[in-house]
């Protein structure tokens, strides 16, 4: 995962999961059926070390 993944999720905050939009489905990183700040945290917690 990289910072672009966090941007992908941030751009989709609040979108509805399981409505036919595959990007919203992908943005729900913690599988709680919501695209919310917890998904951004999920991404940020998994970023690698800074080089």
Image (tube, rainbow, N blue to C red):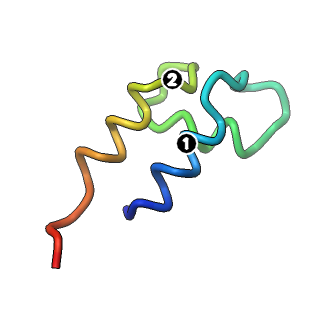
Q: Position of residue 51 (x, y in %)?
A: 16, 79
| Nearer-the-camera pick, 22 or 45 | 45
Q: In terms of image quadrants, where is residue 39?
A: top left
Residue at image mark 2: 36
Q: Under tag 2, what secondary structure?
A: loop
**Above or below, comparing residue 50 to residue 13 in the picture:** below
Q: In terms of image quadrants, where is residue 35?
A: top right
Give neighbour class at mark 1: few <14, some 14-19, many 20+ (Cα, 10 Å). many
Q: Earlier in the sequence, mark 1 or mark 2?
A: 1
**Whether label 1 touches label 2, CB < 8 Å:** no
**Above or below, comparing residue 38 to residue 44 in the picture:** above
Q: Position of residue 34 (x, y in %)?
A: 57, 20
| Nearer-the-camera pick, 39 or 25 | 39
Residue at image mark 1: 9
| Nearer-the-camera pick, 28 or 36 | 36
Q: Is residue 7 left or right of residue 48?
A: right
The structure residue drawn at horizontal position 71% and vertical position 26%, both measured from the top left corner, is: 15
| Nearer-the-camera pick, 50 or 25 | 50
Q: Is residue 49 left or right of residue 33?
A: left
Q: How many marks?
A: 2
């Amino acid at each position: 995962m990289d910072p672009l993944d966090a941007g992908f999720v941030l751009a989709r905050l609040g979108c509805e999961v399981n409505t036919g939009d595959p990007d919203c489905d992908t943005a729900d990183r913690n599988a709680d059926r919501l695209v919310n700040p917890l998904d951004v945290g999920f991404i940020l917690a998994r970023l690698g070390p800074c080089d």
